[in-house]
């Protein structure tokens, strides 16, 4: 049968499968797969996180996922968004989990709810609300009564919310899976005997909530029955030891389509061919559920990104940050899903055999008693083609590829053969902001020791002091040097992320750390006056940590402060009288909100004397059309941006990669944030960026017509 005719037949067969009823009476599993309404299923899933996009974007994102051959939408549940204070809950706007799950259901897909409630996810504090830090005696993610109380309380809250809306498959809803905890085995040993006992408790607690659907634990080889242990990573077909019981299916909850990016880091590009190879290998080795993490990454709005993580999240996913298809990744995987679904009956009902075809070649074959057959011919040689014999027929295998033979005779898909047209993303300038008359500025104040509302005789830990209400904490002290201190150098050691130093309200300099190096040193010559000097140091966090054992004990902020006069003469201020102020004055006044913008003393912009810690304000009209929109902040330094009072995230354009490129210059402005005219733009600039050179752009994709 010719390739085109065969493919048309495959696609028609797939369409019959896709239109099946969603929302069964029972979801169970055996050693082969999940079983829904009495039928075994091979399921393709994709992670789309509801708060990383907007409700207006959800239908299109979910629709494109379905069109791409997905069966399931997977999402974390974000505790810190939903319970910002103990017992106070928020499920509005981008946090409307019920609306999101109902949209999944409306489009005929299943849902997987990863409750955690620890999620990591490159999300501030791993999803924990910071108030948890102040619970007496708490130890996160351990067999610790205070933690277990609040964890169970929130998990139960979400379960009851889903039940009340009838969203579990056992109720006719779309949710077929739930997850408790998240990659706990990475840190379990740190808790000694309280680690395994916590795992057992978490599993028992979850199962007793009686959702009527299975529970999973990812990266947890000792997941207690009936919880299913699953794999996370890029090559689970090679790395996963398999389920810990012959009664459990082989599942992959995170197939990383790219990787998160940090400031100063480059994007990770994972090819469509590589993803397809490892998905197919996992299926060939008895896998039956694969989730792409992420299928759509989206945007870390506001201050939600974890330490050093950029605002754009998994932009290299099959659907990019704006929800546009990245080709050939989206299309190549769509073809793979269709090919696998065509073979699902022999895959789920046949007997598997595995045998060698050559030094680096092998076959996986599933044969039914009724004659149905599917074969996977694997070439693990990444550099050369391989000619092999299979069932007395010669096949040529491309380098590092798997050929799928739907009837053990005809190749219907090869992971290394891309038929999808490539595309590229283009930006079109819609509006510039180069008119000085349309800008105003507000210079933030520099507090000194006497102004500071909080005093202490030691250096305070930053996160415990700010309570995650701000990225910024001022440390201020006063001192009078000896006359011999003629060439003073300020020496600051910090476990924060950035430090700005001011001497007598004059900017002296800054330094910063990086994602991979914990801590940094600021060492700059300063000018002191005769008499009393005021030293003000602004310590900045660029996101809270999101992982590791004993997260509640993590330290940030200044660790040591000295002024060195000579090699032998120095002043140590580590244990000194310090003044503290949480946040900036502009934050206190909330001048980024439209209703409060007049609270500040705005003045005409004056870039001839650019000063760090300056707020800039302008207005703009929304671009015509429906293309996604982004702010090009290439000429800015570091800070945060708000549109109509909504934060579109932190920016740090001045933190460059080893090649000298900015890690991110385009910042997504969802169209739902905008009105037709008169939109307010507020920029908080920490360094000396130039707002007159920024622009508002529209984003689109252009087909390149042939593989590149």
Image (cartoon, grey):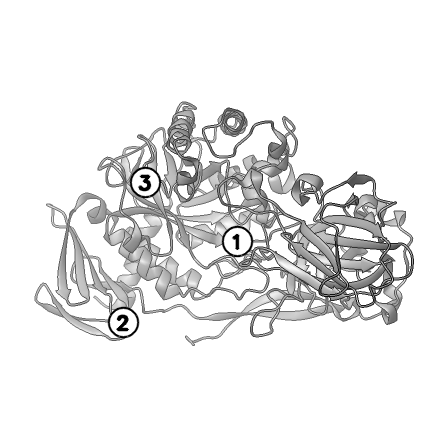
* Rendered residue at 45%/28% (across/down): 143
Location of residue 342 with respect to 263 vertically, above or below: above
Mark 2 lies on residue: 399
Q: Nearer the viewer, mark 3 or mark 1?
A: 3
- Report the Cα–Cα distance between label 2 and label 3: 33 Å
| First-in-chain label (2 vs 3) | 3
Local packing at callout 2 (Cα closer than 10 Å; few below 14, some 14-19, many 20+) is: some
Disc 2 secondary structure class = loop
Disc 1 secondary structure class = loop
Mark 3 lies on residue: 221
- Report the Cα–Cα distance between label 3 and label 1: 27 Å
Residue 532 location (% of width, % of height): 89, 54
Q: Residue furthest left?
A: 392
Specify whether residue 461 is in view: yes
Q: Quadrant of residue 72?
A: top left
Residue 171 location (% of width, % of height): 42, 27
Q: Nearer the viewer, residue 661 or 355?
A: 661
The image's mark for residue 297 is 1
Location of residue 433 with respect to 670 vertically, above or below: below
| First-in-chain label (3 vs 1) | 3
């Amino acid at each position: 049968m010719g390739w085109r005719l065969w493919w048309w037949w495959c696609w028609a067969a797939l369409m019959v499968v896709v239109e099946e009823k969603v929302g069964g009476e029972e979801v169970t599993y055996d050693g082969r797969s999940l079983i829904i309404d009495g039928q075994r299923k091979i399921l393709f899933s994709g992670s789309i996180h509801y708060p990383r996009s907007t409700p207006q974007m959800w239908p299109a994102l979910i629709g494109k996922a379905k069109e791409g051959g997905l069966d399931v939408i997977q999402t974390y549940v974000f505790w810190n968004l939903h319970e910002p204070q103990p017992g106070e809950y928020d499920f509005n706007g981008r946090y409307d989990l019920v609306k999101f799950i109902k949209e999944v259901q409306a489009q005929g897909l299943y849902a997987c709810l990863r409750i955690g409630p620890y999620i990591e996810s490159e999300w501030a504090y791993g999803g924990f609300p910071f108030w948890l830090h102040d619970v007496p005696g708490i130890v996160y993610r351990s067999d610790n009564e205070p933690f277990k109380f609040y964890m169970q309380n929130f998990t139960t809250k979400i379960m009851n919310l889903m039940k009340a809306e009838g969203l579990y498959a056992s109720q006719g809803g779309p949710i077929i899976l739930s997850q408790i905890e998240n990659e706990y085995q990475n840190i379990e040993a740190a808790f000694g005997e309280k680690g395994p006992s916590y795992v057992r408790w978490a599993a028992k607690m979850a199962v007793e909530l009686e959702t009527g659907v299975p529970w999973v634990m990812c990266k947890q080889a000792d997941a207690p029955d009936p919880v299913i242990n699953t794999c996370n990573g890029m090559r689970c077909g090679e790395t996963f030891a398999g389920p810990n019981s012959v009664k459990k299916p082989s599942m992959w909850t995170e197939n990383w389509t790219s990787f998160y990016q940090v400031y100063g880091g480059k994007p990770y590009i994972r090819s469509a061919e590589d993803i397809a190879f490892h998905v197919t290998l996992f299926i060939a080795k008895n896998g039956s559920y694969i989730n792409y993490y992420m299928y759509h990454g989206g945007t870390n709005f506001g201050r939600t990104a974890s330490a050093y993580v950029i605002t754009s999240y998994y932009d290299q996913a099959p659907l990019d940050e704006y929800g546009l298809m990245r080709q050939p990744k989206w299309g190549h995987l769509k073809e793979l899903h269709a090919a696998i679904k065509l073979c699902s009956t022999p895959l789920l009902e046949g007997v598997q055999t595995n045998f060698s075809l050559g030094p680096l070649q092998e076959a996986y074959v599933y044969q039914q008693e009724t004659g149905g057959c599917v074969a996977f011919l694997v070439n693990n040689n990444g550099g050369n083609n391989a000619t092999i014999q299979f069932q007395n027929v010669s096949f040529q295998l491309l380098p590092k590829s798997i050929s799928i033979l739907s009837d053990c005779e005809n190749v219907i898909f090869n992971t290394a053969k891309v038929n999808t047209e490539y595309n590229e993303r283009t930006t079109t300038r819609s509006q510039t902001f180069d008119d000085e008359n349309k800008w105003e500025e507000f210079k933030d104040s520099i507090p000194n020791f006497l102004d500071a509302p909080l005093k202490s005789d030691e250096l305070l830990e930053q996160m415990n002091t700010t309570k995650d209400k701000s990225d910024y904490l001022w440390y201020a002290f006063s001192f009078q040097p000896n006359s011999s201190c003629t060439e003073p150098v300020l020496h600051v050691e910090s476990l924060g992320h950035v430090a700005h130093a001011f001497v007598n309200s004059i900017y002296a300099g800054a330094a910063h750390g990086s994602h991979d190096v914990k801590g940094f040193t600021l060492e700059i010559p300063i000018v002191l006056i005769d008499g009393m000097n005021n030293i003000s140091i602004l310590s900045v966090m660029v996101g809270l940590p999101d992982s590791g054992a004993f997260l509640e004990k993590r330290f940030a902020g200044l660790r040591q402060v000295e002024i060195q006069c000579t090699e032998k003469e120095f002043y140590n201020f580590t244990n000194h009288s310090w003044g503290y102020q949480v946040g900036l004055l502009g934050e206190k006044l909330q001048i980024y909100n439209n209703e409060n913008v007049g609270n500040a003393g705005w003045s005409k912009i004056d870039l001839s004397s650019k000063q760090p810690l300056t707020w800039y304000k302008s207005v703009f009209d929304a671009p015509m059309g429906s293309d996604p929109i982004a702010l090009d902040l290439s000429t800015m330094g570091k800070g945060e941006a708000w549109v109509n009072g909504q934060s579109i995230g932190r920016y740090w354009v001045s933190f460059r990669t080893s090649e000298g490129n900015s890690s991110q210059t385009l910042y997504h402005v969802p169209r739902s944030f905008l009105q037709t005219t008169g939109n307010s733009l507020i920029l908080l600039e920490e360094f000396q960026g130039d707002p007159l050179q920024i622009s508002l752009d529209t984003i689109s994709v252009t087909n390149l017509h042939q593989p590149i």
